[in-house]
Image: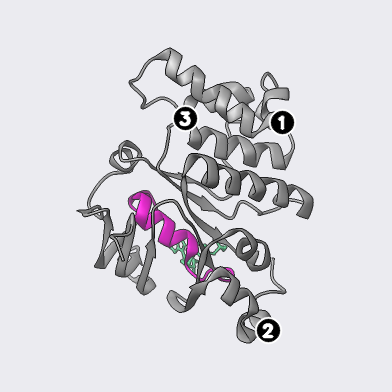
Amino acid sequence: MSTPLLNVNGIEVIYNHVILVLKGVSLQVPEGRIVALLGGNGAGKTTTLRAVSNLLAGERGEVTKGSITLRDERIEKLSTADMVERGVIQVMEGRHCFGHLTIEENLMTGAYTRKDGKAAINATLEKVYNYFPRLKTRRTSQAAYTSGGEQQMCAIGRALMANPKMVLLDEPSMGLAPQIVEEVFEIVKDLNTKEGTTFLLAEQNTNMALRYADYGYILENGRIVMDGEAKALAENEDVKEFYLGMG
Ligand code: ATP
């Protein structure tokens, strides 16, 4: 197999110097795929994403064992800004749009690190609007007054404004009606197919995630307990019994 884009190798993560949350997590994300990281509340999904995007320090967390490589580069000691520069962007759970800004202003904040000029940024904005026509309709609305689904789309759209190679998507289904979740996932799949964007997707909604992902890992209490092709996982009896009712 060729080198995966992302290789997480046996990482341990500790919060506040004492709380061991990840107990040796390994996973691979090949370029151009959608990989789902599944598991219940508190399993360690968000912590895994934070380790990759280097958002742990702000949470008083650190990787104390193992390694993370992006292509062939070790990245555990880099900053969040370094990761953004390398094209890895996390879309946080709970959406985190700036409520007082309009949808378009929110999207433009995603382009702040780009140095390729206004025309290129505007071209990306148009592309984002093509994928998310709802955002175009709501471009001048203050984000606080848009729906949960629109805010989730705005958060993903803002990440896309940085021209990412890989998006770490944390629970995009959280708090959304099933129909909207489906709409969001359809767009993710579309972006993956047409733009080649790689996704690492943390989800409690196992059913929905396995319909759109290529491969899945199941995390339980800080350890990967199962992994496989999404189709095989969706048909696995243990997965059906323990996880498919969730979300
Ligand atoms: P959820 O769906 O609830 O976000 P998750 O699978 O994403 O769950 P994490 O958020 O990674 O899980 O949390 C894993 C464990 O780490 C939990 O026990 C949680 O209480 C703990 N934890 C998360 N963030 C911190 C933090 N900043 N400080 C201390 N403990 C934390």
The residues tagged by marks 1 and 2 sit, at their Cα atoms, a distance apart of 36 Å
Disc 3 element: loop
Q: Amino acid at mark 3?
A: Gly
Q: Is residue 219 visible?
A: no
Image quadrant where residue 69 sits: bottom left
Residue on which the image places disc 3: 110
Tell me, yes or no, whether the highlighted magenta stretch contains residue 54.
Answer: yes
Q: Amino acid at mark 1?
A: Arg
Q: Position of residue 199 (x, y in %)?
A: 48, 52
The residues tagged by marks 3 and 2 sit, at their Cα atoms, a distance apart of 40 Å
Residue on which the image places disc 2: 241
Disc 1 element: helix
Q: Which residue corresponds to the image point at 40% horizontal and 42% vertical from the top-left?
A: 165
Q: Earlier in the sequence, mark 1 or mark 2?
A: 1
Q: Amino acid at mark 2?
A: Glu
Left or right of 183 on screen, residue 80: left
Q: Is residue 126 visible?
A: yes
Left or right of 149 on screen, residue 32: left
Q: Which residue corresponds to the image point at 31% horizontal and 36% vertical from the top-left?
A: 85
The residues tagged by marks 1 and 3 sit, at their Cα atoms, a distance apart of 18 Å
Q: Which residues are magenta?
A: 39-59
Q: Earlier in the sequence, mark 3 or mark 2?
A: 3
Q: Position of residue 235 (x, y in %)?
A: 64, 79
Q: Which residue corresponds to the image point at 71% horizontal and 46% vertical from the top-left?
A: 183
Image quadrant where residue 132 sits: top right
Mark 3 nearby-residue class (10 Å; few <14, some 14–19, many ≥20): many
Which quadrant does the N terminus fall into? Answer: bottom left
